[in-house]
Amino acid sequence: MSATIVQNKEYKNKQKVKDNFISAIIGFFAFVWIFPILWTLWTSLRPYNDIISYGVFSWPRHLNLDNYFQAFRVMGLTKYFVNTLYVMVPSVILILFLGSLIAFVVSRYSFRFNLTLLLFFTAGNMLPTIATYIPVFWLYIKIGDLFGNRSLLYNNYFGIILIHVAFQVGFATFVLSSYMKTVPKEISESAILDGCSVFRHYWNVMLPLLRPPLAALGVLMSCWIYNDFFWALILMSEDSKRPVTSALRQLQGQYVTDFNLLAAGASIVAAPTIILFLVLRKQFVSGLTLGATKG
Amino acid sequence: MSDVNNGISRRSVLKGAAIGGAGLVAGGSLLAGCGKKQVTGDVHFTIRGNLSDAGAKIAIAANDAYTAKTGNKVISQAVNSDDFQNNFVQILQGTPDDAFGWMAGWRTNARADAGLLADVSDQVKALGSSLSAAAIQGATNPSDGKQYIIPTTYYPWGLHYRKSTMQELGLNPESIATWDDLIKLCEATQKKGLVGYALGDKGGWEAMGTFDILNMRLNGYQFHIDLLNGKEKWTDAKVVEVFNHMGQLAPYMNKNVLDISWDGMRDLLLQKKCGAMMMGSWFANDFKAKSQEDYDDLWIVPFPEINPEHGIDSIDAPLDGISVAANGKNVEGGADLAGFLGSKEGIDAAVAAGDTSIYISSDFDTSTYDAFNKQKLEVLGAAKNIGFFLDRDTRGDFAGPVVGPAIQSFLKNPKDLTKILDSTQAQWDALPAL
Amino acid sequence: MKTAAVDRNVRSRRSLSRNDRFTLSTFVGIPTLLQVVFLWGPTLITVALSFTYWNGINVSDIKWAGLANYKNIFFGSPVFYDALKNNVVWLLWFTFIATPLGILLAYQFDRKIKGHQIYETIFYIPVVLSLAIIGIIWNFMLQPGGFLQGVMGRDIGNAISIWGNYDINSYVIMALASWRHIGYIMLLYLAGLKAFDSSLREASAIDGATEWQTFRKIIFPTMRPVNVIILVITIIDSLRAFDLVYIIYGTSTAWPLLNILAFQNFAGQGISMKGAAYSVIALVLCVVPILVYLRNVFKEDLN
């Protein structure tokens, strides 16, 4: 007996040394990992004149937030951030709402098409989007023509929102339906017995129970939609309407030699998602968990 | 495989403007006066590039002059040039701006045939004799004889270099008369630690300039145009010869050819790190924006003769201009603005804002040209035959997706030349009829 | 009593009222309509168009082409095979290097080694960044005048060629893609591990097995459902790769990928339905992984 305990202790000590070693190695790689971001931040804190006079690697003589103020002023970031909100907020709300509708029907009512629906929604989320770019454009123009207004969908926030919703609602459906499977059937049964209409069943009974996955999904979706730059680049011909990540392409060309300004601008644009992640980490993780490994 | 006939009609584009262009032509341009309906309303204009570019500031100045004259507001936006070109067909079908800077040749004519561009023949007529017959021909769509672009600027593709660098090296590029001379120049430049022949082909199109000029020098203008129209084969020994010559230049190129784009080439010249650079002169505005000194240091000579049969009788001289979108909100306004920008007042405003481009309109007084521009005219004048550049002289679905990668592949692996040419020809053969 | 029980049974099996039917139809109908019109519809249109000749402008110009576009791609476009090669490189790298690294990291962090919370955050941050920003950040590192070049003492004139140097550019691109992918896999696996029964691990530890043996023989096999998901996500992300290379090279196919070729031909300056054909090829390659994913995730429902 005592021999085993001693062996355990020895083993544990050896393991601890190994672990510290592992931690150190990973720590080194973590530093390498985050270095590019640190370098960008560093570049953004140095005034332009410093770099011009003394070179990029010089010891800093001044460090200040000038570049940030200038970035806001010169790059028109406020306008682009507002555009991002125009796109992001309605998209996320719609995705969560529509996804919950399907998930609700599919998990609470047994119809024959339930599984097929789920399969299609989940698969839709995984298709390569390049295949759909031109047809979506034509659709938008044709639908616009139907209503007599070409920019009903094209070059319009509404169009971008619609495409985001169409492409992400599958994931929301999948996550929410997996989660709903864990909600006891008795709750629904008693609601039906109480004479709830389908709508009240959904709105008053299920929806409140869905707060955790909705929060998780909301966080994830906000992050993904915020980060997308491609659709707005394609579907919006007016640069002033584009969300901030798409505008970065234009800004990058414009300020290609103003490293510091560009660094500050990039840091500003990167900040929201990083902060979101740091603050709402639990939601992030649970959203991904539900989405990948099925509850 | 349809024919692209633009080339032949451009044979004498420059004769009128370049050689005979000095001095004002009396009664040059009739503008929107005299019984023509006054156009009102806001006009939207797209500037290809970034707002910080020298070109953008010039465009805005010219637009402001239009506003001052007509009272119509011009709302300009800058769009990344690559994105604009890549999404051009979509943008024009959607909600395009009314007018924008564009390029004559296939890109205008094919889109006009598809109904995406507005007919501006009236505006061209209104510009009267300020545009030579050749200029109008260059802007005309051969399929219906109308114009869909108001021609404004053009420029030669030639060997650019800095006078100061050449002086330091004790070399005189003006004395290059043959291929061997060029090679010797590159060698000498290389020995002094600079890049002999600067090239950056990351964008896929930059090296077409070298290809074009080598083809025109070795095999003549007619062969070049015929090749681009599918009448000659890429597997022809003549084409192999072109690539062989490109291969001879390769040792003198910068090592990171596939890493940098045209702006990298320009920077190599700007920072005095290279000798010769084969490019169109449109980048000169960037030099001027950097400093007058840099601009004054810039010089251009025609690519030397290789085959005495053809001499230096051909050159790439792309024609740019202003086009109007057929689906814009204010087509008339766009056409009016385009006409203005091609007229004397528009040109004057642009030049006053620092434009160093050569305008094809004879309304522009070439006697006020600075030395560099005069040299450009000389280079242009020496040529009889004008090409518009490979990606404007042939089909868009061949130039970018096929020829671009083919040249890049060659620069990567010169030994694969036969394979590359075989596949290029195969892909031309497989193109659907337009 | 009996009546109530009968009532209950009757009610739970009752047919739905008209209102309810309407609500259900709307609930299902609207999202499905959206998906069909804006996702599946366009996909099918692309598939259909891949069999035609068209320049993308006037619908009246569409001509039937049969398999011509595909023949052109397979037999006449060497750049296609370059793109396939790059996609395969992407796939292999992700499958054998990036994903395993992510899994390994997840395992170490799950064991709560020192500093694991900070590490988790650091490794995951690239995942929450937009690719537009990642492009800018890495430009600062790699471009002429950037960090790497500066450290090697090279200025703009003699900067080391990275994007155009075909000996190293694939590795650089893969490293950039991994920068993001590893963190993503790490977090997924970590979440999966948390559901894992830790007493099993303790038991094997006391038995004298090393950590590596524990992982290999007990944890990894038990995580099989998660492993499959992770593998499928890895494969699909390799086949969908586009954004990063678009940011670096534009559409110039200097380092081609299937989706870059699709975009260059489908959009761009010379639109041809070859682009549709490329998209269909990418789609077809994704079909098997997607099916495996669906089968795995909906295992219970399907049986």
Image: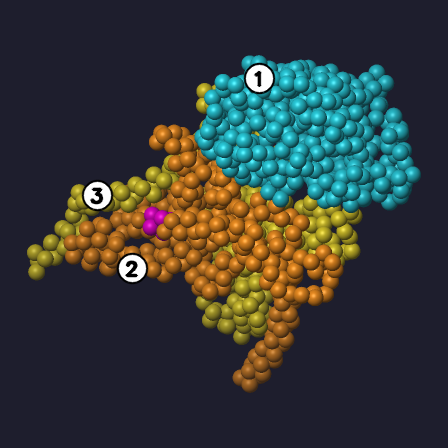
Q: Nearer the viewer, residue B33 or B222?
A: B33
Whole-number angstrom distance, CA of label 2 to CA of label 1: 71 Å
The circle drawn on residue C21 is 3
Q: In the image, is residue A133 above or below residue B304? A: below
Magenta range is A94-99
Q: Nearer the viewer, residue C214 or C26?
A: C26
In this rendering, position of residue C160 left or right of residue A74: right
| Percent coordinates x, y for residue B311 in the rendering | 83, 19
Disc 1 is placed on an element classified as: helix
Question: How dense is the environment of label 3, judged by Cα within 10 Å: few (below 14), some, or many (20 and up)?
Answer: some
The circle drawn on residue A208 is 2
Q: Nearer the viewer, mark 2 or mark 3?
A: 2
> Which residue is under mark 1?
B125
| Percent coordinates x, y for residue B172 in the rendering | 89, 34
Q: Is residue A63 visible?
A: yes
Q: Identify the residue shown where x is 90% and y is 36%.
A: B171
Question: How dense is the environment of label 2, judged by Cα within 10 Å: few (below 14), some, or many (20 and up)?
Answer: few
For residue C139: magenta? no
Disc 3 is placed on an element classified as: helix
| Percent coordinates x, y for residue B128 in the rendering | 61, 17
Mark 2: amino acid = Pro
Q: Nearer the viewer, residue C13 or C201?
A: C13
Question: What letter labels the chain drawn in orange?
Answer: A
Question: How dense is the environment of label 1, judged by Cα within 10 Å: few (below 14), some, or many (20 and up)?
Answer: some
Q: Can you tell which quarter of the image residue C167 is in?
A: top right
Question: What letter labels the chain drawn in yellow?
Answer: C
Q: Nearer the viewer, mark 3 or mark 1?
A: 1
Mark 3: amino acid = Arg
Q: In the image, is residue A130 above or below residue B28? A: below
Question: What letter labels the chain drawn in cyan?
Answer: B
| Percent coordinates x, y for residue C239 in the rendering | 55, 43
Magenta stretch prevailing secondary structure: helix
